């Protein structure tokens, strides 16, 4: 029953969005009815506008999910070890594999694009599925083809806890989560659950720190209390990259409570709609897409340096990916599916 209600609501919203320009222009035409030229102008503009909106919606629904782009960043920081100068990381986020249940070709295309980039490391920043582990199991053989020199490191997103299902008991939900985690282990991904992994090159190291999803404590469990546990054992002056699904966590917890220089996140999808650099996601998230920098906010215990060196080391950033899949409607317009390629640079 709920499925039909949801479908009806979506159809209603689409009709309203398509007909709204026409209705507004018809109102203007009515006001200008004494002028034949302006009356015809507004009527024609209304028809044209509604047709353009309808075309954009159709494009986003039919082709938007296939238009994969790669966004490249260079992240320069003095604490990046010399051995990791030029180190390349590909970030995948919000795959939502249930979106592509009948489109294996799209998932295969993503895997081929990632492998063609030949990264040193692949990181996945949460939301592998929409509602159940079976969605990922359907693509297990394809996901197993991903490869990088230092492997694949992953974390959990809010959807990976199966919290948006009302048809299973809590104990069964736990089994579903474990099933998804076991799949990642089978295909060779290193899943970090409030812990870190040290990447080594020669005698130099960087830390990859992975947190479980930070939720609202109601629909999705709250895991922020494990932030310090995840960094336990990481030297305070060690360059570290934090994988944490929710970008809102960066300002609320990461900047004031951790030494992480860089956080990689996803979650927002840019609401799957981005027009001329704007997205309705900006109404909800302060950091909703792209790169954001912050100077300062380093906990005192995290920085024992002083002078110019300390000032340089206080550059802290977050990269927020638009992700690959969709939630709700399999639709993307402007906020195209995205891979993020990050090159580390020592300065």
Image: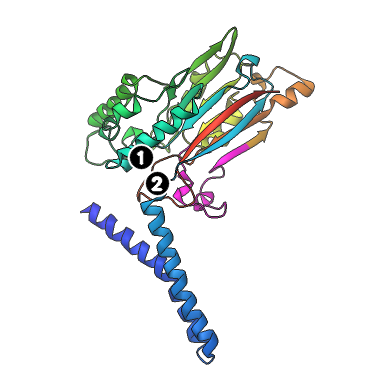
Can residue 124 be seen here? The reply is no
Foreground pick, 130 / 297 = 130
Q: Furthest-left residue in view?
A: 1
Q: Furthest-bottom residue in view?
A: 34
- Label 2, residues with CA under 10 Å away: few <14, some 14-19, many ≥20: many
Number of residue marks:
2
Give the Cα separation between the discs numbered 2 and 1: 8 Å
Residue visible at 54% across and 50% down? 282
Circle 2/circle 1 CB separation < 8 Å: yes
Foreground pick, 305 / 107 = 107
Residue identifier under label 1: 106
Q: Quadrant of residue 303?
A: top right
Residue visible at 30% across and 24% down? 183
Say which quadrant the C terminus sits in. top right
Magenta stretch contains residue 286:
yes
Q: Earlier in the sequence, mark 2 or mark 1?
A: 2
Q: Secondary structure at mark 2?
A: helix
Q: Furthest-right residue in view?
A: 307
Magenta stretch contains residue 75:
no
Q: Quadrant of residue 299?
A: top right
Residue visible at 69% across and 31% down? 296
> Which of the numbered marks, if any, corresponds to residue 65?
2
Q: Nearer the viewer, mark 2 or mark 1?
A: 1
User: Which region shows up in magenta?
Assistant: 266-292
Residue 8 location, x and y as percent?
28, 60
Query: How are the residues colored?
Result: rainbow
Say which quadrant the N terminus sits in. bottom left
């Amino acid at each position: 029953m709920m499925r039909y209600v949801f479908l009806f609501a979506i159809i209603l919203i689409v009709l309203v969005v398509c007909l709204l320009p026409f209705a507004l222009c018809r109102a203007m035409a009515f006001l200008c009815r004494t002028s034949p030229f302006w009356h015809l102008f507004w009527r024609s503009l209304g028809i044209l506008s509604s047709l353009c909106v309808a075309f954009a919606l159709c494009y986003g629904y039919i082709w938007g999910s296939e238009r994969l782009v790669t966004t490249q960043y260079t992240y320069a920081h003095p604490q990046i070890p010399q051995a990791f100068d030029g180190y390349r990381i590909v970030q995948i986020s919000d795959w939502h594999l249930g979106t592509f249940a009948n489109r294996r070709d799209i998932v295969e295309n993503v895997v081929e694009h990632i492998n063609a980039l030949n990264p040193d490391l692949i990181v996945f920043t949460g939301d592998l599925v929409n509602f159940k582990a079976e969605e990922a199991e359907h693509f297990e053989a394809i996901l197993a083809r991903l490869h990088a020199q230092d492997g694949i490191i992953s974390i959990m997103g809010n959807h990976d806890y199966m919290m948006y299902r009302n048809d299973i008991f809590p104990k069964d939900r736990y089994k579903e989560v474990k099933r998804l985690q076991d799949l990642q282990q089978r295909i060779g991904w290193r899943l970090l659950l409030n812990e870190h992994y040290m990447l080594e090159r020669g005698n130099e190291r960087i830390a990859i720190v992975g947190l479980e999803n930070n939720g609202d404590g109601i629909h999705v469990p709250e895991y922020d209390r494990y932030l310090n546990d995840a960094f336990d054992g990481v030297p305070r002056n060690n360059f570290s990259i934090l994988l944490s699904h929710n970008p809102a966590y960066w300002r609320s917890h990461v900047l004031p409570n951790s030494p992480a220089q860089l956080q990689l996140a996803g979650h927002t999808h840019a609401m799957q709609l981005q027009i001329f650099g704007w997205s309705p996601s900006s109404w909800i998230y302060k950091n909703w897409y792209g790169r954001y920098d912050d100077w300062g906010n380093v906990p005192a215990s995290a920085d024992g340096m002083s002078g110019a060196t300390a000032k340089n080391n206080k550059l802290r950033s977050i990269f927020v990916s638009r992700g690959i899949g969709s939630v709700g409607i399999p639709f993307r317009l402007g906020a195209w599916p995205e891979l993020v390629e990050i090159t580390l640079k020592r300065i």
